[in-house]
Image (cartoon, helix red, strand yellow):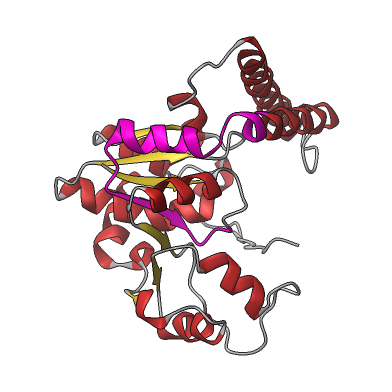
């Protein structure tokens, strides 16, 4: 099984085409979301992958073996808190409340607390090894994510001990040639972020050169372009993308603006 671990909208946007093509070519693939706050049911790409037979689920749902009463309670509280946050935020969005409702934020903070406690106590290397063994994992794939986030570090440790390759796929396309726009970006941070992976797939030479300058071994960085923008996925994406975004979208007289903001 080829395992893909996702967390946010943008990495799913770039990983879904790879999973789709591998499934079409009869590779055994599965997608597991590490982020319990992400709404799988609302993601049209993940739902499309499910319709073609790809296993898609939350990682902590699929492989959450119960280990006593405390683990069960933490698991229940975490899920109920995040579910409440989603409902409250949806209610706030209907009332046009910016940034979600205050009860939704409070529920999200509680959910994060329960998740961190559960991750610290139960989601360790032994748990990760059981995932790789149960799935018969051949390769594990992430986006360009820091190993310290979610349960990436335990999975990388488990894969290394079992000689299973770990791959990091791009979650965007590097375009700028001037100074990095992220204030915290540095060669040291980039090296720590990428050096744990066996192979790193990047969309262009610009990205590879930046990683090599940061100390990452050039031999494990492969320039393969961006699956998100390849012709066959663009054609497929048109078929599954919903066009009914709002009532105003039907009016050609309305000016429609898309703001693509970066994180603060």
Q: Quadrant of the N terminus?
A: top left
Q: Is residue 243 above or below residue 260?
A: above
x and y, in percent, of residue 73 in the image: 66, 13
Q: Position of residue 215 (x, y in %)?
A: 54, 82
Quadrant assignment, res 168: bottom left
Region rendered in magenta:
118-146
Q: Give me the residue at 62% from left, 63% from top.
A: 260
103 sits to left or right of 181: right
Q: Residue 248: image x %, image y %? A: 58, 46
Visible residue check, residue 8: no
**Is residue 183 shown in magenta?**
no
Residue 227: percent from the left, percent from the top? Answer: 34, 64
Residue at point 70% right, 30% down?
A: 117
Which residue lies most toward the bottom here?
Answer: 178
Q: Residue pushed farthest front?
A: 161
From the viewer's perspective, tell me whether residue 263 is left or right of residue 198.
right
Q: Nearer the viewer, residue 97 or 218?
A: 218
What residue is drawn where x is 77% and y is 29%?
104
Whether residue 227 appears in this view of the structure is: yes
Nearer to us in this view, 134 or 262: 134
Q: Is residue 182 above or below residue 127?
A: below
Q: Quadrant of the C terminus?
A: bottom right
Q: Residue furthest right?
A: 102
Q: Residue furthest top?
A: 69
């Amino acid at each position: 099984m080829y395992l893909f671990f996702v967390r946010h909208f943008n990495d799913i946007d770039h990983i879904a085409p790879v999973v789709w093509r591998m499934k079409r070519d009869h590779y055994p693939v599965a997608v597991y979301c590490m982020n319990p706050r992400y709404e799988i049911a609302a993601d049209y790409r993940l739902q499309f992958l499910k319709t073609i037979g790809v296993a898609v689920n939350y990682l902590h749902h699929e492989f959450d073996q119960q280990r006593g009463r405390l683990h069960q309670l933490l698991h229940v509280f975490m899920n109920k808190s995040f579910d409440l946050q989603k409902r409250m935020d949806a209610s706030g969005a209907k009332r046009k409340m910016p940034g979600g409702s205050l009860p939704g934020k409070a529920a999200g903070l509680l959910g994060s607390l329960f998740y961190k406690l559960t991750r610290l106590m139960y989601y360790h290397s032994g748990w990760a090894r059981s995932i790789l063994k149960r799935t018969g994992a051949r390769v594990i794939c992430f986006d360009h994510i820091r190993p310290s986030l979610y349960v990436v570090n335990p999975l990388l440790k488990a894969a290394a001990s079992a000689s299973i390759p770990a791959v990091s796929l791009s979650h965007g396309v590097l375009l700028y040639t001037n100074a990095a726009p992220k204030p915290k970006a540095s060669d040291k941070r980039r090296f720590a972020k990428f050096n744990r992976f066996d192979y790193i797939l990047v969309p262009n030479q610009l990205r590879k050169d930046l990683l090599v300058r940061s100390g990452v071994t050039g031999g494990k960085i492969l320039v393969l372009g961006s699956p998100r923008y390849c012709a066959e996925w663009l054609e497929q994406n048109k078929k599954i993308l919903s066009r009914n975004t709002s009532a105003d979208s039907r009016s050609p007289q309305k000016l429609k603006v898309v703001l693509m903001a970066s994180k603060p």
